[in-house]
Image: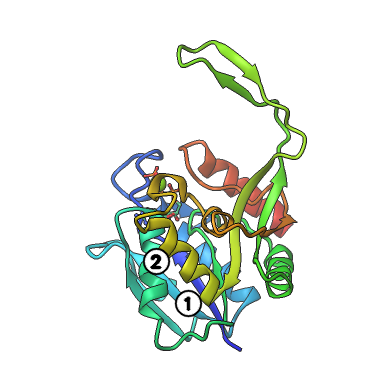
Amino acid sequence: RRCWLIVPAAGSGTRVGGERPKQYLPLSGSPVLACTLERLYQAFPEARLCLCLKHDDSWFDPNQVPFRDWQRIDGGAERVDSVLNALRAIDSEAAPEDLVLVHDVARPCVAVDDLCKLEQAALENEAGALLATPVADTIKRDDGHGLVAQTQDRRGLWQAQTPQGFRYGLLRQALEAALGPCGIGRDRVTDESSAVEALGLFPCLVQGRRDNIKITHPEDLPMAELILQAQRA
Ligand code: CTP
Ligand code: MG
């Protein structure tokens, strides 16, 4: 059975800002995209990589891809559209039971150990699996005017990370349904798990390391740099 990797990398990085999209900013000397792909390659050297990129991406260099077996996919309007483009592109090659792991290009610090743990859990659970960490901060809900309306009970709350892994057939069905006429809609499909949950299934939470951060805001970049340094030490 084949393992497929989908890496959505077709975003604009508007919250990080600047001219160069965040996936091409340097992180200990290499572009973020190259760092992320290197981690994935260490864990899954034989996998087929589907790399979602903007059609007019002028920063991408194929030398940044360590995989032997890979293909470029056109990104869509939202993250979910990029992932779905990849799933549709491999339709004739992927078997329903094949494992698909989806990992954001913006998470370069994911540990190889966690990648392997996640793959195992995704293979063992019919509803798939995702890396996640228990919420450590106290979570407030605002009243819409900057005042605290409520403190959430954080027991049982997790922060979802990537990768998230599912069988091809299930993931395709879940994402197509989520964006279909009776689906939960684009705004609520911020990860693959949410679409699978909407089918009434229960993906498995795999506790991952807290340093698998997503580079989202400018200050996340120096943090990622320090994390990679610490992981190498
Ligand atoms: N992504 C994608 N296609 C899109 C939008 C996002 O492939 N149409 C990817 C991003 O490249 C990133 C991941 O989805 O790897 C998570 O998205 P996010 O962190 O929001 O990145 P951006 O959309 O690039 O950032 P921003 O929302 O700040 O513009
Ligand atoms: Mg985004």
Q: Earlier in the sequence, mark 1 or mark 2?
A: 1
SS type, badge 2:
helix
Residue 24 visible? The answer is no
Amino acid bearing label 1: Leu
SS type, badge 1:
strand
* Residue at figure coordinates x 37%, y 62% from the top left: 82
- Residue 22 vs 169, above or below: the answer is above
x and y percentages locating residue 117 in the rendered image: 74, 67
Amino acid bearing label 2: Leu
x and y percentages locating residue 185 in the rendered image: 40, 49
Tag of residue 84: 2
Q: Quadrant of residue 119?
A: bottom right
| Label 2 packing within 10 angstroms: few (<14), some (14-19), many (20+) | many
x and y percentages locating residue 13 in the rendered image: 37, 46
| Label 1 packing within 10 angstroms: few (<14), some (14-19), many (20+) | many
Q: Residue furthest left?
A: 56
**Nearer the observer, 173 or 18:** 173
**Nearer the observer, 214 or 144:** 144
User: Mark 1–mark 2 contact, CB under 8 Å?
Assistant: no
Asked if residue 56 lies left or right of residue 37, the reply is left
Q: Quadrant of the C terminus?
A: bottom right
Kindly identify which residue carries mark 1: 49
**Nearer the observer, 197 or 88:** 197
Asked if residue 193 lies left or right of residue 152, the reply is left
**Nearer the observer, 87 or 68:** 87
